């Protein structure tokens, strides 16, 4: 999709209720002779995926080719206006903003007592939910009203100790800004760590640790500051690979929400992001009961939330759940997300990072291999290879190719297996990777003519492959494929005539 199709993205993000409201809102608030943007809306709404040729054809049919740029901007503006009207009472921030705007209207009309009461309502809500900047705006408006009313008591307060209240709010916000700055620095360094030497990364971690300690020593009364400091600390320890302290910090963070349940309403996105980080930390530490707890919590919000951004976040967070269920051998559970994934890939296409996409494909392919549903596994393998041709994920796509070879082997399509193995073998040099284990697996399928081998001869080849892989897997960097597919259990399933599903479940239960 091109960048100019911002209107298409906005229209396709609307829920059924938002679409219905938009139509009603436009007909009420638009000029009867100037509703061409509604025709343009209908065109965008009719498209499943954006296609320039189809779009142009529909524009010609509706005679909408003239002034298209202005028409698109008008549609975009009207959709946002209707969304603002539809959602104005659906968030605390919107409600406080509405009170402040109403107070300004009442003030401009000289209805000062009403304006003062409305500002008090805004202040009460802002204090309850720790909305510091909104509270500052309330104090600013309140002082205007107080001066015009000449409310002596209030005026004396603002003339003396009122400044302390504003200073306290500004101090809290300064701490919030400093913590946010540190968090942003942490994210940048963690994502770009390959650009730094090991010594530079160590120096930066030491600096971050000291800064976090200094920030933590601030005795803030603000929920948002406390929450952000804990979030930043947990992220730091996660980046430092100190998962034990990261988990402990995340437990403190969870207790903070338990003590302040009203904050969940306006901080749900942060709550879900931190719950996911907690899930990852427990997953890495193999704390399986905690992983199950976090997955159930995320699933609850996945199916109950109507917020599109939250649903997008939860969609990209499916990866760890799929990985966990596949490691556990619960392939029924991981494959049950297929419809959710298929729908999400269409709905959130341009918003999903390519690494999240390929990870979803990989885990879904493995779930169907585990269930011996090889046609479905093939469907997702082909989708991955056809739709995700990006150099940045060449290693992950190489694993997809290996899975396609395993599927062909399981289906006993040995002639086809030899054909694609030769093709993949020729692609080896294009993969800039030192992962010998991946190249070894490709070579295994390329060099052996399984249609000419007996069962005993095939097992002998598999036994040799297992020994070679075990040697390579002594290097943790070579184990990348094991994060997705337990190739050793797959080999054992043929050597010992057991199902792959059974062996994966057995291995998981022995570790639990």
Image: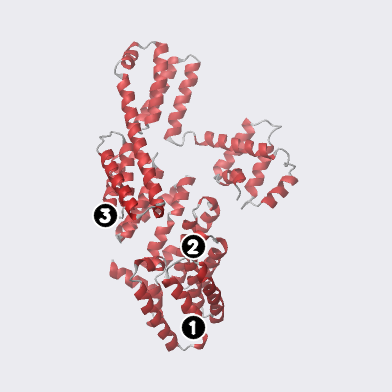
Position of residue 504 measured from the top left corner of the image (x, y, whole percent) = 36, 71
Q: What residue is drawn where x is 53% and y is 60%? A: 390
**Residue 244 badge:** 3
Q: How is the image coloured?
A: secondary structure
Disc 1 element: loop
Reading the chain from its start, which is encountered first: label 3 or label 2?
3
Reading the chain from its start, which is encountered first: label 1 or label 3?
3
Residue 291 figure quarter = bottom left
Q: Residues within 10 Å of mark 3 (few under 14, many from 20)?
A: some
Distance between the alpha carbons at the discs numbered 1 and 2: 28 Å
Above or below for 101 versus 437? above
* Residue assigned mark 1: 448
The answer to whether one can see residue 345 in this image is yes
Q: Nearer the viewer, residue 219 or 472?
A: 472
Q: Residues within 10 Å of mark 2 (few under 14, many from 20)?
A: many
* Residue assigned mark 2: 361
Position of residue 369 measured from the top left corner of the image (x, y, whole percent) = 46, 71
Reading the chain from its start, which is encountered first: label 1 or label 2?
2
Give left or right: position of 217 versus 365.
left
Distance between the alpha carbons at the discs numbered 1 and 3: 46 Å
| Nearer to us: label 1 or label 2 | 1
Residue 434 figure quarter = bottom left
Q: Nearer the viewer, residue 428 or 450?
A: 428
Position of residue 510 measured from the top left corner of the image (x, y, whole percent) = 28, 70
């Amino acid at each position: 999709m091109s960048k100019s199709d911002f209107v298409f993205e906005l229209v396709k993000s609307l829920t059924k209720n938002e679409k219905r409201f938009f139509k009603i809102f436009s007909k009420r608030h638009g000029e009867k002779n100037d509703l061409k943007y509604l025709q343009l809306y209908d065109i965008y709404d009719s498209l499943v995926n954006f296609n320039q040729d189809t779009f142009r054809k529909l524009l010609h049919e509706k005679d909408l080719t003239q002034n298209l740029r202005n028409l698109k901007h008008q549609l975009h503006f009207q959709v946002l206006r209707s969304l603002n009207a539809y959602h104005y009472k659906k968030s605390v921030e919107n409600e406080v903003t509405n009170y402040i705007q109403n107070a300004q209207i009442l003030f401009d009309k000289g209805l000062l007592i009403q304006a003062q009461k409305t500002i008090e309502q805004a202040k009460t809500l802002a204090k309850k939910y720790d909305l510091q900047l909104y509270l500052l705006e309330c104090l600013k408006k309140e002082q205007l009203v107080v001066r015009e009313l000449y409310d002596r008591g209030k005026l004396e307060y603002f003339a003396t100790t009122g400044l302390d209240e504003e200073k306290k709010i500004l101090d809290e916000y300064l701490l919030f800004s400093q913590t946010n700055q540190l968090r942003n620095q942490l994210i940048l360094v963690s994502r770009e760590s390959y650009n730094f030497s090991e010594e530079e990364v160590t120096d930066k971690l030491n600096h971050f640790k000291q800064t976090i300690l200094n920030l933590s020593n601030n005795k803030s009364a603000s929920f948002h500051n406390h929450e952000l400091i804990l979030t930043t600390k947990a992220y730091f320890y996660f980046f430092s690979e100190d998962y034990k302290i990261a988990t402990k910090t995340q437990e403190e963070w969870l207790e903070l929400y338990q003590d302040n349940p009203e904050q969940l309403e306006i901080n749900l996105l942060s709550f879900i992001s931190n719950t996911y980080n907690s899930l990852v930390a427990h997953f890495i530490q193999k704390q399986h009961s905690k992983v199950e707890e976090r997955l159930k919590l995320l699933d609850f919000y996945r199916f109950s939330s109507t917020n599109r951004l939250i649903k997008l976040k939860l969609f990209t967070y499916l990866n760890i759940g799929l990985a966990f269920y596949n490691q556990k051998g619960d392939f029924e559970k991981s494959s049950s997300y297929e419809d959710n994934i298929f729908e999400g890939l269409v709905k959130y296409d341009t918003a999903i990072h390519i690494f999240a996409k390929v990870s979803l494909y990989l885990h879904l392919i493995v779930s169907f291999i585990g269930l011996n549903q090889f046609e479905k596994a093939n469907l997702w393998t082909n989708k991955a290879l056809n739709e995700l041709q990006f150099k940045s994920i060449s290693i992950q796509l190489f694993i997809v190719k290996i899975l396609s070879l395993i599927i062909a082997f399981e289906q006993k399509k040995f002639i086809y297996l030899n054909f694609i193995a030769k093709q993949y073998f020729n692609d080896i040099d294009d993969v800039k990777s030192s992962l010998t284990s991946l190249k070894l697996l490709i070579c295994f399928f390329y060099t052996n003519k399984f249609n000419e081998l007996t069962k005993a001869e095939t097992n002998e080849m598999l036994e040799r492959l297992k020994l070679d892989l075990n040697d390579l897997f002594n290097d943790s960097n070579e184990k990348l494929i094991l994060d997705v597919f337990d190739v050793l259990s797959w080999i054992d399933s043929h050597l010992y005539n057991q199902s792959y599903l059974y062996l994966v479940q057995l291995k998981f239960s022995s570790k639990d």
